[in-house]
Image (cartoon, rainbow, N blue to C red):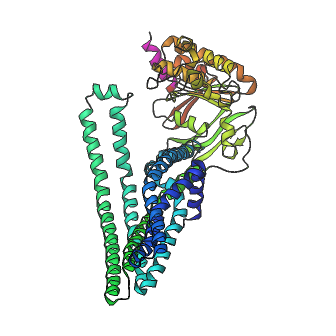
Amino acid sequence: MRFPSHTARLLAGIAREIGFGVCLLYTCVSATAFVAPLALALGVRPLVDGAYRHDRPQVVLGAVLAGIAVLLTVLAPVGYRWATIRMRERSVMVVQRRLLALTSEAPRLTHFERPEFWDRVQVLKRGSEDLANGMTLALIGPVVLAQLVSTAVLLGRLQPLLGLVPIVAFPAIWLSRRSERLKQSAEKQAAQPRRLAQHLFTLSTGAQSAKDVRVYDLSGELLDRHRAAAEAVRTKTESALFKSVAANAASWLLFTAAYAGALILVLRQVARGSATAGDVALTVTMAAAVVAGAARLTDLSGSVTRIGAVAEHYRWLDDQTTLVRRAALAAPPLRLTKGIELDAVGFGYGEDDRQVLSDVSVTLPAGAVVALVGENGAGKTTLVKLLTGMYAPDRGRILIDGKDLADLDLAAYRRSITAGFQDHARFEFTAAHAVGVGEVTRLDDKQLVESALEAGDARFVVDLPQGSGTQLGAQWTGGVDLSGGQWQKIAMARSMMRPSALLAVYDEPSAALDPQSEHALFERIAANARTGKADGRITLLISHRFSTVRMADLIIVLADGRILEQGSHTELMASAGLYAELFEMQAAAYR
């Protein structure tokens, strides 16, 4: 079986990760399915003719070959089952790790905004076992071809026309490939409704959405939507499945016709006295072996088509997640002296013309605390994503001490950043590791983790059953769930694992905190900002609570994706613009 070079490299890589020993064992036990019928066919002729002629050596030879065939037939299912289970377990994990690497190692997040990306991931998840089985085809294919050639030669010696029986494989292969293309096309079309069905299942069974489902009595609605999504999947796949079954049925009709034709030819020879009973037995078993081999070759051909399609999805995904990787990029500065400048930056999500940010030009001075404020949808979080390199601007430049961010090594740049997000990840590890991943190279540095817990106001960890060694997450044995505020404190402690970061970003870091905890948190942020001034650290703060925003050296007011105002709290209050209006409105609520 031949694959394009990129598919062959992919399969070889997967085989290496699974283990060549397991792959070889799986190939060997699979090959017995083709060797056993051939051994039986070769043994039955001397066995029958030897018994008829009382030729003991022929009987012994036939019995030995037939015995080998029977032994292989009996043992093959046991070995095949053992090898298949291990292949499946290892292959699924290997492909999952590869998908994890492709999605998590991509420097930017652009691909996450594309529905096509998620559709292809869905197809890849369903085709993971096909990829794992693919590397065995290169070894099994030649075995099947050798079987067909051997049987064609032996049958041709009995009757030249019988040597043409294996040709039946060629139209069957065409039908099989046609069948697989239909199924792959249907799988791609069904990917989105299948993802929707899975999403609805997760909503219905997940703990995070359980309260909403019950309060709003959404069980019936979710069931109806799931039923509609399932119906969409059925509509798109069943037609292709029917055509596929019809193509396979046509293949088997060809095989049946070939088998019947071979049997009729040899029986006519027997009637003319030009063939023996052993020839009949040989033809019957050999023709059966040909049909089985041709059928297997047809399956392999279909597998090649299927694997090629899955591998193409993998290559597309790899291309999308590596588009921004470039060689020999510049290292970021060790410390900031000028700051970060946004020069006429514009950005929009998706392929439409709607811009989230337009012509944003501003300088974040080195060593400053900068606050971003504005109403929901103003573009604050998008600006943070651009500053952290998660997206590249559609227009304009972001300069880090005068160097274009597009020319910097993104991985190295991110190692000089720390962040606390409102929509932070909940790493259900031990409490220490959930914090320690903030600087993975010092994951087990107990002193640094303890300092980060203190700086993030996450002292509650010492009261957990096993302290910082407590497993987080109620779904794990011995695990402890945390409140929303406690999870946020863990996230903030994680952001403190990089005390020498050049850019510290805090996007609504106190959204789940009470006023006392919020005040304590911002006191610590301010203290860290003062400590980092010597390195030129920029502390970027996004918050709707203006009592904390006023501490910033520079306040930037965004509205409709543009900078409306910028200055200190005193300057902005004096200008009586949007900032002053929002500040007074919020302050009035506390009077």
Q: Is residue 196 visible?
A: yes
> Is 53 in the magenta?
no
Magenta stretch in the rendered image: 579-590
Which residue is drawn at the image coordinates 75% and 26% (left, top)? 535
Is 247 on the left-hand or right-hand side of 29? left
Is 343 on the left-hand or right-hand side of 348? right
Q: Position of residue 423 (x, y in %)?
A: 49, 29
Q: Is residue 349 visible?
A: no
Which residue is drawn at the image coordinates 51% and 36% (left, top)? 379
Pick whichever, 491 or 420, lies toward us: 491
Q: Position of residue 480 (x, y in %)?
A: 47, 19
Q: Position of residue 431 (x, y in %)?
A: 56, 21
Which residue is drawn at the image coordinates 53% and 52% (left, top)? 317
Which residue is drawn at the image coordinates 32% and 27% (left, top)? 212
Pick whichever, 386 or 244, lies toward us: 244
> Is 582 in the magenta?
yes
Q: Position of residue 312 (x, y in %)?
A: 51, 58
